[in-house]
Structures are given as structure tokens and as C-alpha cells.
Amino acid sequence: MKIAVPMFMRDKDKKVLEAAAPGAEFAYGKEDAVLQGAEVIIGNVRPQRLAALTDLKWVQLNSAGADAYCKPGILDPRVQLTNCTGAYGQALSEHMLALTLSLQKKLYLYHRNQLEHRWKDEGEVTSLDGATVVVVGFGDIGRAYGRLCKLLGAHVIGIRRHRGAMPPEAEEMGTMEDLPRLLGRADVVASVLPGTPETTHLYNEQLFCAMKPGAFFINCGRGSAVVQEDLARALKEGRLGGAALDVTDPEPLPETSPLWDVPNLLITPHISGDHHLPQTWDKAVAIAARNLRHYLAGESLENQVDRKTGYKKSI
């Protein structure tokens, strides 16, 4: 069995994977050199490369997002697709919390003042203590962020597709149908939705108008979920207190994009869920190794992706 790993691997990572599949042929390196003849791929590759791989039976992504691989014609329906849900909760939630506090405490304004050598008090700030935080997309990442906000005294409302048991990270739960009603209560709205047809341009003029005046909006899911012109208008008109985007549409954000100059908007270049935090990579490798053992034993794989929805399957 050939296992292609077209991504960077430390020596210790290779040992973890190879221990999970003794006797397998591992091919490490750039995707053009290692994909041909692979039964298993561990790591993200260009989606358009997959259709030609006739021996392929399973793709283990190193990302939580799988939307690019769910489009028709990308993968044979018989090929299993799994993602890395569980690896990114810590990194993303901490980044989201940092963005939240930077907006609430106006740190971005003070950084601008520092660059301009200006000593200026920017006035009143807000706190998570007593604030209502609506987290849209209450999976692994959303729950991790909700837990951090709750520890700082926030009232957390989680939004997910279906109703279910109340998770400990939230005080209330709702579905996407409840979102317009709940936005009016939120001091902070944080989105970690995947890119699907249902989430495309979800955050538009109507939803921004439904938000509480002065609320903060954070998006660390997919840039396609936001109508960026509508967000810019809400910020320029002062309807929102501020916003932070780790994702945009397109990416990279062009130098000529008007978003760069929108007041009270923080932008980071889609790095919250990258592998800058070593623990993230350790968890991703561990997930791949566990799934290799499941695969070789003929067992059900963890983190199977429903290609109709782009979400992790509920098993």
C-alpha cells in the first residue's frame, strides 16, 4: 500500500505515521512527485489533481475545512474523505479571543497611534464580563472559543445546524433559523462557519442591520460567508463597533481592496488555523495516525466529511 504525504513532515512526525502503518510504502515530498499510485493521501493537495488518481481510496486532510474537496467531480464518491477536526480548536479560539479583546480594548487604535507617535486616550472600552457572545458554528472550534469567553464572564449562545443537547461551553443554543433574532442581543458575533452554498453571503446588509448597535463582528471561518461591501458600510456608518477578519474573499486580499482602509477593521491573513502553534501540528499528525490504524483494521474513520454539506458527519 502506498501512502502519499505531500506536505512538510518533521522526522518525529514520520515516525508516528510509519508506526501506525508498518510495512506500508510512504512517499514524502511535493505532490507532483508522490501522488501517482497512492491508495492513501495524508495532507491537502490541489483538488483538481485528485480525479486522475485511479488507485486512491482515502484522503486525510490536514485542515478542518473541506469545502474545496466537496465540489462535484473532485473526488470519486467511493473515495473516503476525512478532515482534521480536533486539531485547530486551541489555535483558532485563542486567535479569536485575541481579536475580540483587541476590538473591545481598542488596542488596534493604540497601535496606530504608536506608529504615528501620538499619545492619545481613545476613551471608553468594553469587557467580556457580562457580555453576550453569539458563536455561529458551534463545533470543535466554536466550542473552544465559547469556553474561553465563558471563563471571562460572557453569556455564550451557540448556533449550529440542528438542535441537540446543551454543551457545557454555552448557556443557550440556537439554530441558523434563530440567528436573526439572536443577533440583536449580541455584543460579539463570532463566525467559524465552513464554506458551503448555504453559508455563502450569509452575513449581508440585513443581518448586519439586525445586530446590536456597537456590536463587534469576527469571522475566522470562510471569507465567502460575508458580503464585504455590506460589512464595510456597517463599519463606516458606525452601526458596528468594530470587526476582525482572518478570512476574506478573495485570498490573498488584493492590495487595492477598499477593506484595508475601512475604519475599525482588523485583518489577519488567514493564519489563525495554520500550523504556527506547534500543538496544532502534533494533533493533526496524531489524528492521521489514528485514522491509519482504523483504515488498516477495516474500522470506521474519524472525522468523515459529508460531501453534501461540507461538515463532519454525525456518526
Image (spheres, grey):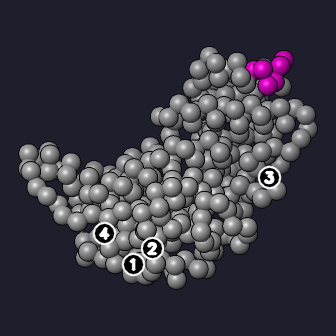
**Mark 3 nearby-residue class (10 Å; few <14, some 14–19, many ≥20):** few
Residue that mark 3 sits on: 77
Give x and y (percent) for residue 124: 23, 66
Residue that mark 4 sits on: 241
**Mark 2 nearby-residue class (10 Å; few <14, some 14–19, many ≥20):** many
Seen at 91% across and 38% down, the residue is 298
Instruction: Assign the N terminus to one quadrant of the image.
Output: top right
State the mark number for residue 186: 2
Residue 225 lies left or right of residue 165; in this view the side is: left
Residue 203 lies left or right of residue 80; in this view the side is: left
Between marks 3 and 1, how big is the CA–CA gap? 44 Å
Give x and y (percent) for residue 51: 71, 44
State the extent of the magenta-drawn residues as a range.
Answer: 18-23
Select label 3 or label 2 by which is in front: 2
Magenta stretch contains residue 208: no
Query: Please, what is the three-letter code of the amino acid marked with disc 2?
Result: Ala
**Mark 4 nearby-residue class (10 Å; few <14, some 14–19, many ≥20):** many
SS of the residue at dot 3?
loop
Residue that mark 1 sits on: 212
Which residue appears farthest toward the right when viewing the image?
A: 298
Q: Are marks 1 and 2 in contact (CB under 8 Å)?
A: yes
Query: Please, what is the three-letter code of the amino acid marked with disc 4?
Result: Gly
Q: Quadrant of residue 138?
A: bottom right
Going from N to C along the chain, the mark reached first, 4 or 2, is 2
Give x and y (percent) for residue 244: 37, 58
**Mark 1 nearby-residue class (10 Å; few <14, some 14–19, many ≥20):** some
Q: Are marks 3 and 1 in contact (CB under 8 Å)?
A: no
SS of the residue at dot 4?
loop
